[in-house]
Image: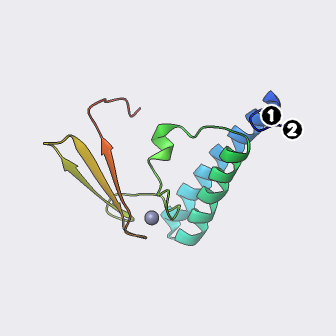
Amino acid sequence: MKRGKKPKWQIKIAKERMKILYDLAKDEIKKGNLKRSQRYIELMRRIGLRYNVRIPRKIKRSFCKNCNALLIPGKTARVRLDSKRKIRIVKCLICQKIYRYPYTKRKEK
Ligand SMILES: [Zn+2]
């Protein structure tokens, strides 16, 4: 079967699984289980790739693409705003990767 030609019902299930995995990841990080949380994010991303399901931007920006840790300000991430350049700088405190996101377009919701 060609990539991206998965039947609709499979994609629907994939999306549901991704949502469950994301919720599990959030639960685990709250409990302090970083490793388990990273694993759930990894699985979520893998399902997304396999079924060609795009991860919503809001979710995509809430975890580190480098180490799969959920980015929680003050816990696993440091967030700074560069108001001059209208950039939000997010640093993952787990792997030290830095992300820069423009925030001119306020369509985060
Ligand atoms: Zn990271």
Q: Say which residue appears at 38% left-offset and 34% top-offset.
A: 108
Mark 1 sits near ligand 1, with its Cβ under 8 Å away = no
The three-letter amino acid code for the residue at tag 1 is Lys
Q: Please state, as top left, top right, bottom left or bottom right, where the N terminus lies in the image.
A: top right
User: Of the numbered discs in the image, which one, if any, rests on residue 66?
Assistant: none
Q: In the rendered view, does 7 fall on the left or right side of 52?
A: right
Residue 106 vs 75, above or below: the answer is above
Q: Position of residue 70 (x, y in %)?
A: 48, 58
- Which is more foreground, mark 1 or mark 2? 2
Q: Residue lying farthest front?
A: 2
- Residue at point 53%, 56% (across, down): 26
Q: Secondary structure at mark 1?
A: loop
For the residues labelled 1 and 2, say whether their Cβ atoms are less than 8 Å apart: yes
Residue 1: image tag: 2
Marks 1 and 2, the one that precedes in the sequence: 2
Instruction: In the rendered view, tell whether residue 11 sits above or below residue 62.
Output: above
Give the side of residue 52 with respect to residue 65, left or right.
right
